[in-house]
Structure formats: C-alpha cells, structure tokens
Image (tube, rainbow, N blue to C red):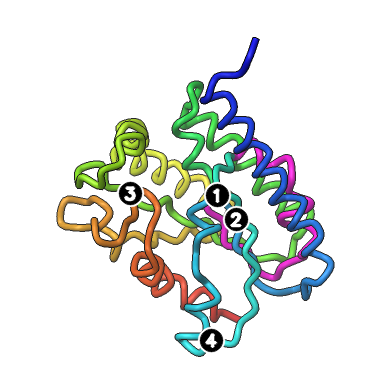
Amino acid sequence: MSETIEEVQQRMFAEEKKDKVRRYKHLNQYVKKGEILFVGSSLMEQFPIYELLLDYNVRKTIYNRGIGGFTTYELEEVLDTLVFELEPSKIFINIGTNDINLPNFTTRGLIERYENILRKIMKRLPKTRIYVMAYYPVNGVYDYGNDFMKEALKVRSNEKINEVNQAVSCMAERLNLCYIDVNENLKDEDGNLKHNYSIEGMHMYADGYKAVFDELLTFLLEP
C-alpha cells in the first residue's frame, strides 16, 4: 500500500530530525568544552543567539543544539550528542511543547520524562548549571492565514501552556534548578503572544527573541 501524503511528510520530517542529529555529531568535534549550551525544540533552534550576542557586545560562546519538532522522547534518546559531548558549564533548556500536541499527552507524563532528562544531565554533568526555561505563550486569536497552525493552537493553547509551565516550575524547584519565566515581555494585554512578534502564532521573529534574550542576559552573564 502506497503512503499517504501525510505519511510521507511525517517520514521526511523524522529523517530531517535524524539528519540534524548526525550533523551536530560531526560539529561536536570542534566545540570548546565548558561553554554555554542552548538545547530544545524549534523554539530554541530558531533563537538568533549569535546575532543578539554581537548586538549586545556580549563575549560569550553559546552552542545551539535545538532541533525543530523534538519532543522529550526524542531528546532523551540523543542526550550524548546534544548535551554530554559538549560538557557545558551552563545549559538553557526548553523542551516539551511539542509533547502537548501528541495524542497521548498528559502533563504528568511530560513532567516525568522531563525530570528524567534533567536527572540524567545532573548525574552525568554534576558541575553544570541548568536553567529551565518557561514555555512561550502562543497567539491563536490573530489571523495569520495559517489554518494548520490555527488548529494546532486549539490544543497547544495558552491555558494549557500556563498549566504545564506551573508544573515545570514546580519540577525545577523540586530539583533545585533555576526556572526562568521569560514571558513577561512576550505577552499582550490578553496574555497572548504579541501578534507582531510571531510568524504564525507559535514561532517568533527576532523581535520576540530579543525580548527573551533581555530576560536571559543576567543568567548568561553569571560567573
């Protein structure tokens, strides 16, 4: 039986993610250990961190190992490549929003997987400082002309994101890790992601990332 268009797209997306892991594996040969690491899904992968560092004249080395579409399931499988091989001094992590759109999603299940990831990092890299970032708000109200994303954001709503962020915050406190709520300057008066910051209601332009960077800067500069 031939594949449907949706099945072909899913297979190609899965291969694309595997290819990114392979590329990072090769790139890791050239990293300088003991620097800063950003890791997570597309919301981390698309962070224009290098340009913002230059704009702010911040002399820090940051490696970005985000992969679009990644879930907690997938990150846990490739921690060696995306985290351990770099031996970072600091990790800023944002993973789990894609889990919300999975058919079997539960907040409890997400937190269990997320905590397992963090405990593995803490055990393998005990001297590494870990910063757990809040999930960003979305905007399912403004019409971006993207019907697919509009449907996705009915599931990944701000109500659900706020609920999960509360659970992530409690998890970080339980593990004695730093939780960073970077959302204050991202939200409009109704609590949605500012529409001019976003491409289609979820992913952001550089304006949105600058607002996040402003919240992260203190932590990036910590000795």
Q: Are marks 3 and 4 in contact (CB under 8 Å)?
A: no
Query: Which corner quadrant of the image does residue 181 belong to?
Result: bottom left
Q: Are marks 1 and 2 in contact (CB under 8 Å)?
A: yes
Q: CA distance from mark 1 to mark 4?
A: 24 Å
Which residue is depicted at the point 50% across and 60% down? 46
Q: CA distance from mark 3 to mark 1?
A: 17 Å
Most extreme residue toward the bottom is 57
Density class for disc 2 (Cα within 10 Å; few <14, some 14-19, many ≥20) is many
Which residue is depicted at the point 77% across and 71% down? 31
| Residue hosting label 3 | 200
> In terms of secondary structure, where does tag 4 sit?
loop
Tell me the mark number nearer the camera, choosing from 3 and 1.
3
Residue 61 is situated, as x and y percent measured from the top left of the image, at 65, 78
Check disc 3 and give the amino acid type: Glu
Which residue is depicted at the point 24% across and 56% down? 195
| Residue hosting label 2 | 66
Magenta stretch: residue 65 in it? no
Numbered range of the magenta stretch: 72-94
Which sits earlier in the primary sequence, circle 2 or circle 3?
2
Most extreme residue toward the left is 189
Magenta stretch: residue 74 in it? yes
Q: Is residue 75 left or right of residue 199?
A: right
Q: CA distance from mark 3 to mark 4?
A: 30 Å
> In terms of secondary structure, where does tag 2 sit?
strand
> In terms of secondary structure, where does tag 1 sit?
loop
| Residue hosting label 4 | 58
Q: CA distance from mark 4 to mark 2?
A: 21 Å
Check disc 4 and give the amino acid type: Val
Which residue is depicted at the point 51% across and 21% down? 104
| Residue hosting label 1 | 41
Density class for disc 3 (Cα within 10 Å; few <14, some 14-19, many ≥20) is many
